Image: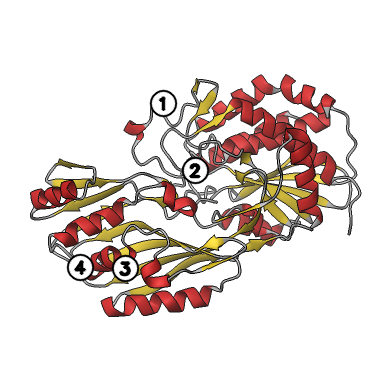
Amino acid sequence: MDELKQVVENNQEQLIASIQDLVKINSVEGEPMEGMPFGEGVDQALKFALELGEALGFKTVYQDGYYGYIEMGEGKELIGILGHLDVVPVEKPETWSFPPFEGQIYNNRIYGRGALDDKGPTLAALYAMKAVKESGIKLNKRVRLILGTNEETHWKGINKYLEKEEIPSIGFSPDSDFPMINAEKGLLQLRLYIDKGTHFQVTGGSALNSVPDSFHYKGEDIHKVATAAANLNYDYKIENNSITILGKAAHSAKGWEGINAIARGAIALTSENITSPILEFISKEVEEDVYCRNIFGNYYDDVSGKLTFNVAKIRIDDKKQEVFVDVRLPVTKQKQEVLDILTKGLSPYNISLEELDSLPALYVPEDHYLIKTLRKVYEETTGMNGAPIATGGATYARAIENCVAFGSLFPGEEKTAHKSNEYIAIDSLMKSTLIYANAIVHLVENREK
């Protein structure tokens, strides 16, 4: 481990520069183009990472803009590391202290969209592979860093990989928290709608997996709405004949860390009798409760905790009303049961429901070889408790069997994914790179079958 540590440290300057260059690429998913199914920025980020992997001496594969991979080692068995290069949109760049696509360094941190989720950790895994290679450690298995392209939306990239390529027998995704995540809640994304418009306009939110930080109303009685917002102690601003009610962005899986601007907007409007069935449902049934207990009650399990319910996007105009919702299900609960409960709750409002996307839960028991191995690596490298934890996050780990999310955020660190001023701490970056290098070494050793 001492030799690996020295090699990792020797590569620090190069790793940081690579992350800065990758962060400079705006890889928010865009309009499809020929040969670029997720837009030019995503494709540029994918090609950058693959060219870097090739320059470091690894085998690389690019597949039609959907995915790529970087591979090292020899042998029949394949170990997978699953990362992604797309990022969520930057809703309000003016709230950032540093430009979101420049990768600036301040106070020993790399700032930028994707620095933490997931460009920085993905390149940490790549440089962990480089450290293993430079240390001269012979691998009797192959290690493949799989690069996804639209993880933040519909997983078309990783699904295309699963259709066309070899599936790793075991692996991890550097896209969550340490010590490791052995239980990920099920994901359910929905559209709630009414094909009937209103005399006013409402918009808010940009990504289904983010707590919305703004809600925009355009219509009559703007100053009455402002008075209601002030009485409710909501932050707001008036401009261009509209009012914007402000919230605080956070990841949908950790909705309690944010302030849902759509929920606040619905509450403010309905308090002034500016309403619609969609707004009434949000203000009366959801409120600002991330657990939506008015509909679901105390819905939880002992493995992964409570169901969470994020009203992520809303669009209301003179033609239709629709709201987009992100639900995270406890790992032992069934999707159909959740749909049945929600459908019953929507019934009094005559709101229809459309399922947009879903992902099954992930659960790997603590006595599994993978969990025991990664726990040992984490504890030996950090000296900290490596007991696995549960989360509402949806990572690529659930794309294959025998895979878990493993870092890169350490316990107690600020969670800035999907938020303004996203960053990765350089000291933590280097520590996670060493952990990943040690994990590669341990996972390629002969193991239980």
Residue type (three-letter) at the residue carrying disc 4:
Ser
Residue 379 picture quarter: top right
Q: Are marks 1 and 2 in contact (CB under 8 Å)?
A: no
Identify the mark nearer the N-term, 1 or 4.
Answer: 1
Choose top left, top right, bottom left or bottom right for residue 324: bottom left
> Mark 2: few, some, or many residues within 10 Å (few <14, many ≥20)?
many
Percent x, y for residue 37? Answer: 52, 51
- Looking at marks 4 and 3 on the same chain, the residue that comes earlier in the sequence is marked by 4
Q: Rounded to the nearest whole Å, what is the CA distance between mark 2 and mark 3? A: 31 Å
**Mark 1 touches mark 4? (CB < 8 Å):** no
Q: Which residue is mark 3?
A: 285
Secondary structure at badge 1 equals loop
Question: Of marks 3 and 1, which one's residue comes earlier in the chain?
Answer: 1
Q: CA distance from mark 1 to mark 4?
A: 39 Å
Q: Is residue 388 left or right of residue 263?
A: right
Q: CA distance from mark 3 to mark 1?
A: 38 Å
What kind of residue is marked 3? Answer: Glu
Residue 98: assigned label: 1
**The C terminus is located in which quarter?**
bottom right
Residue identifier under label 4: 276
Q: Amino acid at mark 2?
A: Val
Which residue carries the number 2 mark?
87
